[in-house]
Image (tube, rainbow, N blue to C red):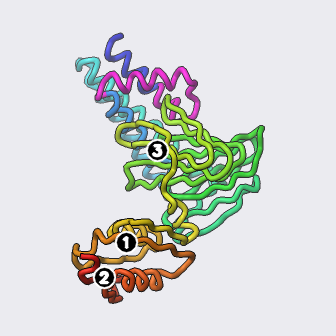
């Protein structure tokens, strides 16, 4: 197959994938093209990145959309027709991205009925179908104003715990970057933070299907799906993290966990700062449980248990001492 034909096919399949219109055969073919040439992966990543950014865009003005279309018109007029087919295909890919971006911006501007929830603290919300979702701070959830009429679909960025009301006729689908999570009625945790190298799904009850490109796994209670954002690999393992819901419950179980890892988790859950003044106590093993205690209380227990000192300043908690050494 010629290179220009391959790139045309890649663009078409990428758009289908992002619009949730791709068949299984389309997804399989897309996976083959991405594995075939690193350049294909670069084009795909750029299209996906632009789609995601524009899908979440806010406050786009009419003037900005008009300027975008003017740039597109100029790009078309200035197409270097004597360039190689590969160069033309790269231009076509760029134009496709602009078209998609402009269309989505238009949709966002005039479809004001869509719902978007941005959590600046831990919040719990109930959807029209009775499903309950707990959102961690700095998490964003969005869905159509027509949610539950014909389908149940949401878009997530961040971390959330889902308790889905069962509906065998309308599966509940969560879109997370290039990953889709589909359920009928179950409870599970999704961690899809932009800064993280992986997306994780842990099932508590029921059954969950996780799809990434042409790969798919089915999870049962106690199992975890992990998507590596860089390699695109999806795999299933047993969940061995007792603290995967700590951000929601404020309950912790530490068993011979190094103090440095305990501090990292506590900082993430409470959104505050604990500093180890020196590295002397970093590897001290911590074995203790906490249930809904304040961060002040937890830090004091850790300091007393490991024979450390703790000082609270405007920057957070500062832990010092020789500890277990």
Please tell me which of labels 1 and 2 falls first in the chain.
1
* Residue 97: quarter of image: top left
Q: Residue at x 40, y 80 (%)?
A: 302
Q: Is residue 211 above or below residue 128?
A: above
* Residue 74 position in % (x across, y down): 33, 35
Q: Residue at x 63, y 55 (%)?
A: 162
Q: Residue at x 47, y 85 (%)?
A: 297
Q: Is residue 42 above or below residue 140?
A: above
Of 108 and 66, nearer the camera is 108
* Distance (Cα) linking label 1 and label 3: 24 Å
- Provide the major secondary structure of the magenta segment: helix
Which quadrant, please, contains the C terminus?
Answer: bottom left
- Near mark 2 (Cα within 10 A), the count class, few <14, some 14-19 or many ≥20, is many
Q: Which residue is identified by label 1? A: 263
Q: Magenta residues?
A: 13-39
* Distance (Cα) linking label 1 and label 2: 10 Å
Q: Which residue is identified by label 3? A: 226
Front disc: 3 or 2: 2
Magenta residue check for 21: yes
Residue 96 circle label:
none
Magenta residue check for 259: no
Of 124 and 97, nearer the camera is 124
Q: Which residue is identified by label 2? A: 319
- Near mark 1 (Cα within 10 A), the count class, few <14, some 14-19 or many ≥20, is some
- Near mark 3 (Cα within 10 A), the count class, few <14, some 14-19 or many ≥20, is some
Of 313 and 23, nearer the camera is 313
Please tell me which of labels 1 and 3 falls first in the chain.
3
């Amino acid at each position: 197959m010629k290179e220009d034909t391959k790139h045309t096919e890649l663009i078409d399949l990428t758009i289908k994938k992002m619009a949730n219109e791709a068949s299984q055969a389309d997804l399989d073919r897309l996976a083959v093209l991405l594995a075939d040439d690193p350049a294909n992966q670069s084009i795909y990543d750029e299209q996906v990145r632009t789609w995601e950014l524009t899908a979440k865009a806010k406050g786009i003005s009419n003037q900005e959309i008009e300027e975008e279309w003017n740039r597109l018109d100029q790009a078309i007029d200035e197409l270097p027709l004597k360039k190689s087919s590969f160069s033309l295909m790269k231009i076509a890919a760029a134009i496709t991205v602009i078209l998609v971006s402009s269309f989505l911006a238009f949709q966002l501007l005039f479809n004001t009925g869509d719902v978007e929830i941005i959590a600046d603290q831990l919040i719990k919300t109930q959807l029209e179908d009775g499903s309950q979702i707990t959102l961690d701070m700095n998490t964003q959830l969005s869905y159509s104003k027509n949610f539950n009429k014909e389908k149940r679909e949401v878009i997530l960025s961040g971390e959330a715990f889902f308790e889905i009301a069962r509906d065998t006729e309308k599966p509940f689908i969560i879109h997370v970057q290039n990953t889709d999570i589909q359920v009928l009625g179950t409870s599970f945790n999704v961690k899809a933070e932009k800064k993280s190298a992986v997306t994780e799904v842990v099932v508590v009850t029921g059954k969950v299907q996780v799809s990434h490109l042409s790969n798919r796994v089915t999870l049962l209670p106690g199992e975890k799906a992990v998507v590596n954002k860089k390699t695109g690999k999806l795999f299933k393992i047993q969940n061995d993290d007792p603290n995967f819901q700590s951000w929601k419950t404020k309950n912790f179980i530490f068993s011979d966990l190094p103090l440095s890892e305990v501090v990292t988790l506590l900082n993430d859950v409470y959104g505050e700062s604990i500093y180890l003044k020196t590295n002397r106590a970093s590897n001290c093993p911590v074995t203790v449980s906490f249930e809904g205690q304040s961060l002040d209380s937890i830090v004091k227990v850790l300091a007393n248990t490991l024979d450390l000192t703790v000082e609270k300043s405007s920057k957070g908690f500062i832990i010092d001492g020789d500890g277990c050494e």
